[in-house]
Image (cartoon, helix red, strand yellow):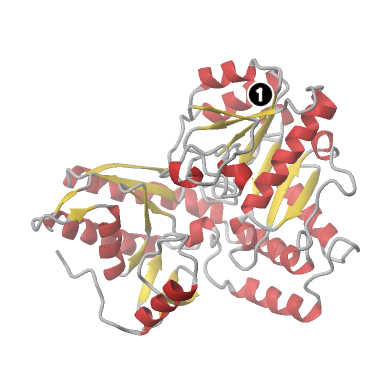
Amino acid sequence: MPQLTRSRSKSQDAIDLEERYGAHNYHPLPVVLDSGKGIFVWDVEGKRYYDFLSAYSAVNQGHCHPRLVKVMQEQAARMTLTSRAFYNSVLGEYERTVCELFGYDKLLPMNTGAEAVETALKMARKWGYERKGIPAGKAKVVVCEGNFHGRTITIVSMSTDPESQGGFGPFTPGFEVIPYDDLAALDKALEDPHVCAFLVEPIQGERGVFTPSDDYMPKAIAACKARNVLFIADEIQTGIARTGRLLCSVPDNERDPAKRPDAVLLAKALSGGMYPVSAVLANDGVMEVFTPGTHGSTYGGNPMGARIAMEALAIVQDEKLSANAERLGHIFREEMNRLVEQHAFVKLVRGRGLLNAMIIEPREATDGSPLTAWELCLLLRDNGLLAKPTHGDIIRFAPPLVITEEQLREACGIIALSVKQFGQA
């Protein structure tokens, strides 16, 4: 098998510093990135890589998009933060831009994906008590097995990942977990009149780009509407063109409230990776449960984040990134399915748009050492492409949406070479 370790270098010095002074709550791939432009990143030694993770789909517009850099510089010199103690000259325009683009009445601005999820949970419970008439303290939120909505105590309380929960209890009550992509299980859960919301990812990214049946989202939305239950779409990773349309959970041209999520959560690519920005979108009948003092954030809605987010969304539209993701996603899966045919250990390729995953069968090398998705990612790194494994046998592939067909095909060649080397080890 090709050598997977590196001699001491600038990279190793940087890794050693993080290991010495940083909390060990991540297991990064051993590569130290120093700069990025478009779909490429460079390490501290100057080696160039295709970025096929996009900061977990935060960098849909590409690294350091010149329009975003310009806007950030301009706003940084003008005003960065006011808090919500005052109005600012950017926030209202930002709220209108996002609401009109996605088709909702109101936006509540936050900073991170986890904050957006926490906001939605508070909103759903308050709506359940005030609008649905659920008895105080009895509101229940339905979620799915294999979910990943963040890492706060409340959010991991509804997780089925042992690593997320181990050693962090006691947990927040009020959640019911059902199987993903199982409409019968959802229907049964919705029979409980204390259910206020169903929170779901249109594609379970952290689970390994686990993609449901084509009719799961529309039928789940219809089931929730029939039971007066809020349907909350966590589009933090799947939204903003990643899967070939603005929102993965609903077609772009669908504006019938009866066929759309009651609330949508956005983050990551909402700022193009330039700044922490998240948002909860809902119509008046839901969002108006929030009144002054019931929720807030010092940085939420700050001028810097608002200005960057407007430009990030404009780039998605101007550069037709949804259409690019849709078209190139088909090409990518076609190329990857050739590897399924050629290599017995490549079991499956799945995804939508430019959010995809390859499932491989772990095995032993000729010298008895383990060969998992991690080892394949190390080969990809050595050959000039960065991706990250999950669950030991899955590799997620999610390049910036500005990638061209020529670049995509070159990257597919790198993946094919790495898979061949993996098979020969």
> Where is residue 270 drawn, in percent x and y?
64, 57
Occupied quadrant, residue 92: bottom right
> Where is residue 79 drawn, in percent x and y?
81, 75
Q: Quadrant of the N terminus?
A: bottom left
For the point 17% across and 43% down, the residue is 344
Occupied quadrant, residue 33: bottom left
Q: Residues within 10 Å of mark 1 (few under 14, many from 20)?
A: many
Name the residue nearer the viewer: 105 or 8. Answer: 8
Q: Quadrant of the C terminus?
A: bottom left
In the image, taking residue 414 as reference, residue 66 lies left or right, namely right
421, above or below 157, in the image: below
Tell me the kind of residue under disc 1: Cys
In the image, taking residue 204 as reference, residue 228 lies left or right, namely right
Visible residue check, residue 401 = no
186, above or below 374, in the image: above
Occupied quadrant, residue 308: bottom right
> Where is residue 43 drawn, in percent x and y?
40, 78
Name the residue nearer the viewer: 103 or 164. Answer: 164
305, above or below 237, in the image: below
Q: Name the residue tied to disc 1.
A: 224
Name the secondary structure under disc 1. helix
Visible residue check, residue 394 = yes
Q: Residue furthest left?
A: 366
For the point 71% across and 21% down, the residue is 194
In the image, taking residue 309 as reference, residue 12 lies left or right, namely left
In the image, taking residue 84 as reference, residue 397 lies left or right, namely left
> Where is residue 360 drawn, in percent x and y?
26, 46
